[in-house]
Image: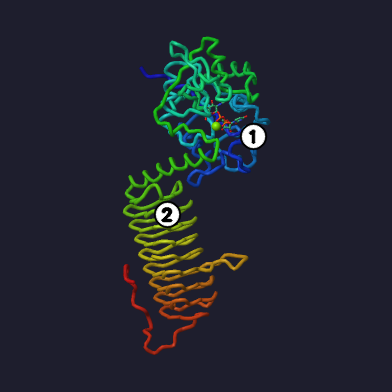
Amino acid sequence: MKTKINPLACIILAAGKGERMKSATPKVLHQICGRPMLHYVLDVVSSLKPKEMVCVLGHQHEQVAKVLPKTIKAVLQRKQLGTADAVKSGLSGLKSFKGTVLVLCADTPLLKKETLGKLIKYHTENACAATILTVLLVKPAGYGRILRDRYNSIFGIIEEKDADDFQKEIKEINTGIICFDKDKLIKALTKVRPNNRKKEYYLTDVISILSSQEERIEGVCIEDVDETMGINSRVELAKANSVMQRRINEKLMREGVSIVDPATAFINYGTKIGPDSVIYPFTVIDNDVIIAKRCFVGPFAHLREGARLEDEVILGNFTEIARSKIGSRTIAKHFCYVGDSRVGRQANIGAGVVTANFDGTSKHSTLIKDNAFIGSDTILVAPVVIGKYAKTGAGSVVTSRQNVKDGQVVVGIPARPLVNKNQPKTTPALRRGLR
Ligand code: UD1
Ligand code: MG
């Protein structure tokens, strides 16, 4: 029999103070692999294609609103009186909606679509008043515990702060992700009182209220303990970051990228890397980086925003690339900084090369053309252009706007053309691997 799928609305709670983060930044904007944790939750919610999506904002709402996509309705919870009050605010944005309401906390960024799908399916098939996503934790401290009677039926949730020693032993926890029948939720919310240690209106109290009305409450217990991790502190933030990093790295490896030591490859969400590229240990890749095929990066490389590597680029240890495009087969094997630059194909960036792109007020760009050879320890003071097959001597300083012509060889400080009759007009093309 095909189950009738009820219309779905999602309420994402993001109004809380996030006190345990001890931060001036709103909790849900703290980053995980280069992205605010809220965005992961919004992605997974959007993938369910709900009829309505409402995000409840409160504490520092102006800042959070800035990163909220237009497809998501924002409602304001004026005072942070607790999760039940936040859901009430959320419902004010769903006046004409009828059906299932899925409540999620914006501080659970590791959730997967399949899990939510399973929860909603179970809720609908069993026509429950509430269905709670739960998980068994060896160390459940900090979470609300699921209370079950001797028939194994759920009759409540008790928060850690209000739990007695016996209840604290319960390993099954509330992930904060709960499906509700909208009408039953609204009625139960009117009965919630702040009778607890924190003097807050707890959404979790809705469960005991519905239970006392003999309504059907179920739990869907999942196995993956990482997925529902709630981020309340910096320690949990770091844990979530490493789980997400593992997911990102494993996806890249499945797509054909070699990551020598996934535990020390810090690659931000959304990085594109072509097949047969190799990422060596202790490499940091920030947002908005694209690496093409068969590149070698690291160890100890830092690719910052706007780095673009074409095919077969080699970047060795202690190389930093920012807002720069590096042409195919160009090599920079040892410590260097390339910023705001465009580097052609098959160029050689020697050890210790620096593009001095900042004059204290503004940033300037450097253009290094195909097959140029930038000698060790060269400083290129931007804006400057280095011609095709041009060569700079070791330790030279090419000053700004003193462009080096195609095939020209410059040396010294400030760099000037080398006067040497024996010097060939053009340097031979530097082939890959030749040093
Ligand atoms: C909550 C649950 C707990 C569960 C845990 C899972 C309650 C009372 N407790 O606890 O049972 O085990 O999540 O991670 O629901 N928020 C608002 N407005 C408020 C208060 C909170 O929008 O007035 C938002 C927060 O921004 C956050 C979410 O609600 O996204 C949960 O709040 P948080 O303070 O993190 O609750 P926990 O103590 O983690
Ligand atoms: Mg929380």
Q: Quadrant of residue 119?
A: top left
Q: Is residue 54 visible?
A: no
Answer with the quadrant where ligand 1 appears in the image: top right
What amino acid type is highlighted by mark number 1? Gly
Q: Is residue 59 visible?
A: yes
Would residue 162 appear left or right of 300 to someone viewing this image?
A: right
Q: Residue drawn 48% across and 34% down?
A: 46
What amino acid type is highlighted by mark number 2? Thr
* Residue that mark 2 sits on: 283
Provide the secondary structure element on which disc 1 rests.
loop
Q: Residue furthest right?
A: 78
Q: Label for residue 58?
A: 1
Provide the secondary structure element on which disc 2 rests.
strand
Q: Quadrant of residue 405?
A: bottom left
- Marks counted in the figure total 2
Image quarter (top left, top right, bottom left or bottom right) of the C terminus: bottom left
Q: Which of disc 2 and disc 1 is earlier in sequence?
A: 1
Would residue 206 appear left or right of 248 to someone viewing this image?
A: right
Q: Is mark 1 within 8 Å of ligand 1?
A: yes
Image quarter (top left, top right, bottom left or bottom right) of the N terminus: top left
- Which residue is at the front of the view, 351 or 367? 351
Q: Quadrant of residue 159?
A: top right
